[in-house]
Image (spheres, grey):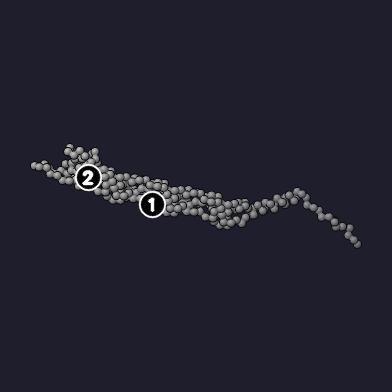
Amino acid sequence: KKSSHRKSKFVKKPSLLWLQMLASLLGGWQLNAKASCSAGFYDNSGVCVNANYGYFVPITTATSQTPANFGSYVSITAATASVLAMPGYFVATTAASTQTEASAGYFVDMAGASTQTAAPLGYFVSTTGQTTATPAQPGYFVATTGAISETAAGFGYFVTNSAATYRTAVTSGYYVTTSNATSQTAALKRKRAGNTPMTSSIFSRLSTCSSYGSLTRVPSRSRNNIFCRFM
């Protein structure tokens, strides 16, 4: 006996709405799938994105970028590592894309610095981007930190050593003839007739005896000289 149920010759097609729902589900799964990104790139919702300036990605399959730390910087995109600031430069912030040159009066003596160092007393830094401070030479001194130049001792003073922080005034009976003297010179001894006490004196072509220290101007017969005497 033949069955009364006959198989349909036609397969029922899925509706358009059902196909749209299926496509939406499949599309969402693809977008949420984890991307396989190279170093220098990171996964952003299934899309590989290059690291920005100031950031880097050191590993594969990363999901975020890493900011450059203090003392380092990243000047390109898609970087796999940060770069240490060179000696003479520093980086004071994170996620920096450049390094900063040390200012005049300051120096940086190592790589990877996050700050610059002021020249100490007795030293100076005259230009930018320096790795060391320069000691004041004899005849000069530096009395402040962060100095960009050294200061001459001045008339009536002298500086014997390098890296000096102060100048020394000439003592009684001594003088200096330059503004950057490294030592003082004893004045000549003269004794007048009778019981006149011994004096110390020098001849000067300058306009004042104070340029030499504690000396007093007295009349001179020479038109080109001033006679300076210390009693």
Count how many numbered circles sit on residues in the image.
2
Q: Which numbered dot is residue 132?
A: 1
On the picture, is 67 further left or further right than 125? right
- The residue beneath circle 2 is 175
Residue 136 position within the rendered picture, expressed as x and y whole percent measured from the top left: 32, 49
Give, as a three-letter code, the residue at label 2.
Tyr
Position of the C terminus by quadrant: top left
Local secondary structure at mark 2: strand
Residue under the point 11% across and 42% down:
192
The residue under the point 24% across, 40% down is: 206
Q: What whole-number distance in Å separates the C-alpha atoms at marks 2 and 1?
A: 35 Å
Left of 42 or right of it: where is 216?
left
In this rendered view, identify the residue nearer to me: 31 or 129: 129
> Looking at the image, which is closer to me, 93 or 193?
193
Tell me the amino acid under the disc marked 1: Thr
Mark earlier in primary sequence (2, 1): 1
The local secondary structure at tag 1 comes to loop
